Image (spheres, helix red, strand yellow):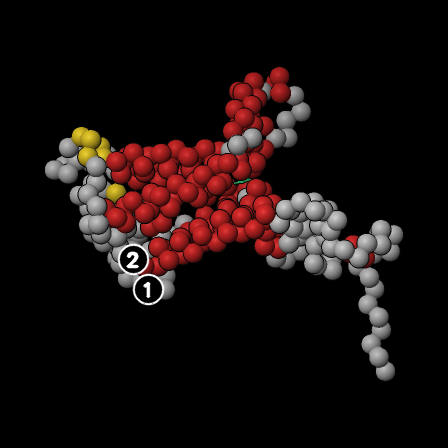
């Protein structure tokens, strides 16, 4: 006995226009999702490799710590890199030294409203572009596992705020002179710019916008929250750009620290 024919779903559902071609678009609609997938892949590969190698992540002379290892709270961290002390013992090689916050940062980026759009189109193909049919037969949205986890974004946002404070502390520590005291090097500036942009990305989050000005019935009754909300809203219009820029500055910051820590180059010193 042959299996019953499956009900047509998705763009082939009853009532939809009967079009055999996947799309009638003739422009290069695939270019944007392709570039997005490549950009995300570069960051994921770089960050994964660097998070596990455990080399050249700390410059003791100038107190430069790469953001991929911050905070470093294990006995496995090199001396000086643990700005907040060591709370756990030695870690096996398969656990990154930045294990405390990396899962939350990953969660924050994965559930980000912009990144969702980016990887839904470029990787999930749901759909890859406007007027291009997706390959999936069904669409359940973010109402069940695993995508229902996307609704936890605001909680990742709260953790990201704490991580931004930790990164800020690392940036302050990076103004350290080679012979002690205050000093400024190119590394201090790169780390600081990265932290400022991370703050901009974090504060431009849609959840932040909601936290500051959401659920208010009358803005006039909450002038301070309204003022903050307008500033956050301005920043929010640049959220996509900040999402990409911070991926770049994270890699540049880590790469520079790696070069200095490994002795490949010397830090350009401006003061001391
Ligand atoms: Fe992108 Fe919150 S929406 S970080």
Q: Position of residue 201 (x, y in %)?
A: 47, 36
Q: Position of residue 77 (x, y in %)?
A: 26, 55
Q: Residues within 10 Å of mark 1 (few under 14, many from 20)?
A: few
Q: Position of residue 262 (x, y in %)?
A: 22, 52
SS at badge 2: loop
SS at badge 1: loop
Residue at x 62%, y 49% (from the top left corner)? 30
Residue at x 65%, y 50% (from the top left corner)? 128
Left or right of residue 94: residue 77: left
Left or right of residue 257: residue 130: right
Q: Are marks 2 and 1 in contact (CB under 8 Å)?
A: yes
Given residues 103 and 127, the one toward you in this image is 127
Mark closest to the chain's N terminus, 2 or 1: 2
| On-image quarter of the C terminus | top left
| On-image quarter of the N terminus | bottom right
Residue 239, compared with residue 72, is above or below; it is above
Which image quarter has ligand 1? top right
Residue at image mark 2: 54
Residue at image mark 1: 93
């Amino acid at each position: 006995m042959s299996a019953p024919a499956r009900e047509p779903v998705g763009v082939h559902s009853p009532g939809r226009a009967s079009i055999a071609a996947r799309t009638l678009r003739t422009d290069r609609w695939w270019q944007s999702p392709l570039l997005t997938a490549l950009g995300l892949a570069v960051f994921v590969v770089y960050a994964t490799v660097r998070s596990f190698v455990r080399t050249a992540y700390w410059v003791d002379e100038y107190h430069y710590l790469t953001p991929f290892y911050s905070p470093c709270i294990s006995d496995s961290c090199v001396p000086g890199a643990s700005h907040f002390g060591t709370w756990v013992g030695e870690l096996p090689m398969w656990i990154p030294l930045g294990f405390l916050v990396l899962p939350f940062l990953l969660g924050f980026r994965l559930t980000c409203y912009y990144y969702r759009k980016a990887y839904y189109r470029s990787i999930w193909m749901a759909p890859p572009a406007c007027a291009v049919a997706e390959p999936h037969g069904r669409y359940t949205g973010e109402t069940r596992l695993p995508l229902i986890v996307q609704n936890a974004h605001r909680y990742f946002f709260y953790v990201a705020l704490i991580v931004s404070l930790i990164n800020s502390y690392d940036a302050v520590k990076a103004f350290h002179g080679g012979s002690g005291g205050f000093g400024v090097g190119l590394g201090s500036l790169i780390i600081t710019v990265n932290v400022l942009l991370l703050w901009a990305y974090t504060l431009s989050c849609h959840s932040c916008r909601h936290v500051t000005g959401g659920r208010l019935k009358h803005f006039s009754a909450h002038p301070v929250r309204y003022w903050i909300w307008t500033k956050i809203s301005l920043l929010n219009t640049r959220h996509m750009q900040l999402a990409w820029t911070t991926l770049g500055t994270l890699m540049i910051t880590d790469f520079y620290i790696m070069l200095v820590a490994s002795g490949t180059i010397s830090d350009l010193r401006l003061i001391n």
